Structures are given as C-alpha cells and as structure tokens.
Image (cartoon, grey):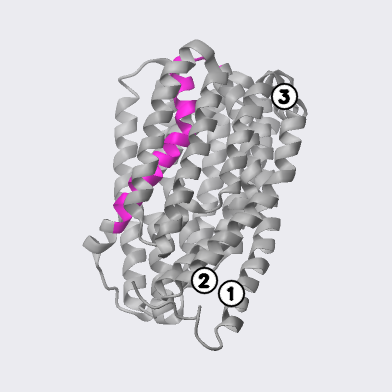
C-alpha cells in the first residue's frame, strides 16, 4: 500500500501545516473568485431569461443540457483524468508523460466532439419541431464546451486556479451578457438563436484565452520534453471517469432533459431557473474543490495518505460551513431570488426549496466523488453514479407525467443526497 511519508516521521508536522495553510489560503482565494463567478453566471441566466421569456429560456436550457451531457462524453474522461495525471507527473517530474497526456487529451476531444456534433446535426433533420432546433444548437456549442472544460481542468492541475475560474466563470458570462445586450441594442429584440450566438462567441473567446494561458503555464521542462505515451494505461483510468462523469451529468440534468421531452418549454424554463439558484448553495464546495483535488492527488500518489484523508475532511468542513448561509437565504426567500429571472418565474418556489435541500447535503459531504477518482477508485465512482443516474432517469420518467416539475425536483434532490452519502462511505476506505 506504500508508506505514509510525511505523516508520521520526524519533522513531518511542519510540511503538513504548510500544506493545510496552502489549502486555507487557496480556499479563501477561490471562494472570492468563485463567488464572483457564480454571481456572474446567475446574472447571465437571469439576463437570458428576461430577454426571451419562460418559453425561450426553456428552449435554450434544453439545448444547454444536451450540450452539458455530451460535453462529458466527447473528451472520454480526459478532463478529470488530467487532474490526476498532471498533478502526479508534476509531483514526480515526468515531463514527457505530462506532455504526452496533454496532447492525447486534445486530440481525443477534437475528434470525438466533432463526430458527435455531426451526428447531432444529422439527427436534427429526423426529429420535428423544438427538439430539432435544440439538437442544432447543441451541435454548434459542443466542441467549444468540451474544449473549455478540458482547458479548465488542465489549468487547475497546473496550479493556475485563478485563470481557470476567471476564464470560465467571469469572462464567459460577461462576454455572453455583453453580446446579448449588443444584439438587443442593434436589433431592438432577441430570440433564442441570439442568446446561443452570444454564448458561442463568448465561449470562443474563452477557448482562445485558455489555450494561450495553458501554453505559458507549462514548466519549461515539459515544453521541451519529447512526448511519451501510455494510451492504454491512460484510457483505463479515463474511461471509467468518463462513464462516471456522464452518469453524474445525466443525473444532474435528467430532470431538465425529461421535462424538455414530456413538458412545455415554459415548465423547463421555470424549473431550470430554480436549479440555477439551488446550485448557488454549493459554490463554497466548488471553490474548495478547485484547490483541494490536485492536493489530494499529489499527497496520495506521493505516499502521504493520512495527509490526503485530512485534506478531504477539512474540505468537507469548509464546504459545509460555506453552504449554510446561502441555503438559509434560498429556503426562506425563494420568490425573491426567482424574481431576478422575471415575474413569471416566482411560481417555481416549491421546486427551488426541494432542490436546495439536496444541494445542502451535496455541500456537506465534501469532495467525495473527486476523492474516489484521485485515489484510484474510478470503478467505484462510476458504479455509484451509474446506479444514481439510472434511478434519477427512471424516477423522473415515472413522476413527471403525474407531478410535473415538483416530482422531478423530489427525485433529483433525493438522488443527489443518496449518492453523496454513499460515496462518502466508500471514500473512507480509499486511504486504508
């Protein structure tokens, strides 16, 4: 199992305190940046909703849900795999493998995302109405969304947390909002195609900036090293991550996908507004995860398993405490928050309260999924998510025709809470 270096030996306390100090400093930094980013993303969706109304926002949300799910499939697990491989190769000074892993990640994402986009475009001519439009929007957005996600994880693995947060959570929403406002001023109004165009242009800008930032962030040794490839070994890790990530995204977006298929665009719009607000509860956990996940990987693969476990527990504490204030606000004043999207959205208050409870459990259990991934438990991660995703999809298909959006919220919140508690139990075994 390997010795727990740095945990028990003489002089180990000082390095361990240094690691936890870095976690605290990084978490505070990420909390501020990620908090600003979450606020800007919330603003972006509120502007979109006000620009096109409940139905138009529902149509865009349906297309974005398709893109989000397929954006996990296209890179075949490489975004999360890079968090593990890059931090591991940096720790060990394996520059050729670092260069090779990054190249294979780019190549895989490009080929698979373009292939899926062509399939979506073809399918759009076989289905009627709004579904066809959603598929075309998803085909346009998918390659960019997949590459932006890949670049973000690579930057985080290289320790460029600020860059990863600023680009995706500040530049992207600000650019999209600016694009919508310019179109409204120029045309006097805007439709769903207009907000998709603004989102695409902003994502393209983020892609260009992240590519430049990633290149300049690589260590000189990595840039000069000849790429080394272990494709079979890498894919043995990445594919379970892709499967698990797909199931996680499917679980998170199954409600919108099922509602988009079985309910009206207005219902989807109302529900997605509630979901966007509920996710604010976990922004503290997301900020902590951005810092702690590469640290857990480095500690675990460096033989410091006790330190890795302590990092996970401290991340739970920080994420849970940070989630309490926004959870209280969401539970007490849901109508006020929904009003930012427009007067018609306040009727989604019951949905928002239900989703908020699930996200509170999510935040309180900490980075359990990432802990499994960073410690070589990809199969356990994938298996738990597969069960949760199937339960969520089947549950939504059963309850949505009867109870509508409220039923979808109950199924989703229950699945999120149960999955996190299950993974928490499993993650404790990873350090033994």
Sequence-wise, which precedes: disc 2 or disc 1?
1
Above-or-below relation of 248 to 87: above
Element at label 1 = helix
Answer few, some or many: residues within 10 Å of disc 2's Cα (few below 14, many 20 plus, some between 14 and 19): many
In this view, the residue farthest toward the bottom is 10
> Mark 2 sits on what residue?
307
Q: Secondary structure at mark 2?
A: helix
Q: Are marks 2 and 1 in contact (CB under 8 Å)?
A: yes
Instruction: For marks 3 and 2, give the CA distance.
Output: 47 Å
Q: Position of residue 382 (x, y in %)?
A: 35, 46
Q: Nearer the viewer, mark 3 or mark 1?
A: 1
- Tell which tag, 2 or 1, sits nearer the viewer: 2
Instruction: Kindly identify which residue carries mark 3.
Output: 342
Residue named by callout 1: 19
In front of the other: 179 or 319: 319
Q: Kindly report the distance in space between the C-alpha atoms of the residues bearing marks 2 and 1.
A: 9 Å
Q: Is residue 140 visible?
A: no
In the picture, measured across the screen, residue 260 lies left or right of residue 236, that is right
Counting from the top left corner in percent of width and height, residue 421 is at 50, 44
The residue sitting at 43% across, 69% down in the picture is: 300
Magenta-colored stretch includes residue 252 = yes
Image position, residue 232 (x, y; %): 21, 61
- Residue projecting furthest to the top: 402
Name the residue at 52% across, 54% down.
Answer: 367
Q: Earlier in the sequence, mark 3 or mark 2?
A: 2
- Residue sitting at the far left: 232
**Quadrant in which the C terminus appears:** bottom left
Depicted 313 relative to depicted 333: above or below: below
Secondary structure state at the residue bearing disc 3: loop
Viewport quadrant of the N terminus: bottom left
Question: From which residue to which does the magenta span run?
Answer: 237-265
């Amino acid at each position: 199992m390997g010795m727990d270096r740095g945990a028990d030996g003489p002089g180990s306390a000082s390095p361990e305190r240094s690691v936890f100090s870095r976690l605290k400093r990084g978490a505070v930094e990420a909390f501020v940046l990620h908090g600003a980013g979450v606020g800007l993303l919330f603003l972006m969706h509120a502007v979109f909703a006000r620009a096109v109304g409940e139905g138009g926002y529902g149509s865009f949300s349906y297309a974005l849900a398709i893109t989000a799910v397929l954006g996990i499939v296209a890179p075949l697990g490489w975004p999360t795999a890079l968090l593990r491989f890059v931090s591991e190769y940096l720790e060990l000074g394996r520059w050729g493998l670092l260069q090779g892993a990054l190249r294979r990640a780019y190549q895989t994402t490009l080929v698979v995302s373009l292939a899926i986009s062509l399939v979506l475009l073809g399918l759009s001519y076989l289905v009627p109405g709004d579904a066809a439009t959603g598929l075309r929007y998803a085909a346009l957005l998918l390659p960019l969304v997949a590459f932006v996600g890949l670049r973000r994880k690579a930057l985080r693995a290289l320790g460029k947390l600020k860059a990863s947060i600023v680009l995706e959570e500040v530049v992207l929403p600000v650019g999209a909002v600016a694009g919508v406002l310019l179109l409204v001023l120029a045309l006097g109004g805007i439709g769903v195609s207009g907000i998709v165009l603004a989102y695409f242009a902003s994502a393209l800008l983020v892609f260009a900036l992240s590519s430049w930032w990633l290149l300049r962030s690589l260590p000189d040794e990595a840039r000069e090293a000849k790429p080394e490839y272990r494709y079979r070994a890498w894919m043995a890790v990445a594919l379970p991550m892709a499967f698990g990530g797909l199931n996680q995204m499917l679980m998170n977006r199954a409600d919108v996908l099922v509602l988009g298929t079985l309910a009206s665009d207005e219902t989807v719009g109302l529900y997605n507004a509630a979901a966007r607000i509920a996710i604010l509860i976990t922004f503290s956990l997301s900020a902590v995860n951005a810092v702690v996940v590469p640290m857990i990987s480095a500690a675990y693969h460096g033989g410091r398993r006790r330190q890795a476990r302590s990092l996970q527990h401290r991340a739970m504490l920080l994420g849970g405490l940070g989630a309490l204030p926004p959870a209280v606000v969401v539970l007490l004043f849901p109508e006020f928050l929904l009003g930012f999207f427009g007067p018609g959205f306040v009727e989604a208050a019951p949905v928002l309260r239900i989703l908020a409870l699930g996200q509170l459990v999510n935040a309180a259990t900490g980075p359990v999924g990432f802990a499994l991934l960073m410690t070589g438990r990809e199969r356990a991660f994938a298996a738990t998510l597969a069960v949760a995703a199937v339960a969520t999809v089947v549950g939504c298909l059963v309850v949505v025709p009867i109870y509508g959006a409220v039923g979808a919220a109950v199924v989703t919140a229950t699945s999120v809470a149960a999955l996190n508690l299950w993974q928490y139990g499993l993650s404790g075994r990873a350090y033994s």
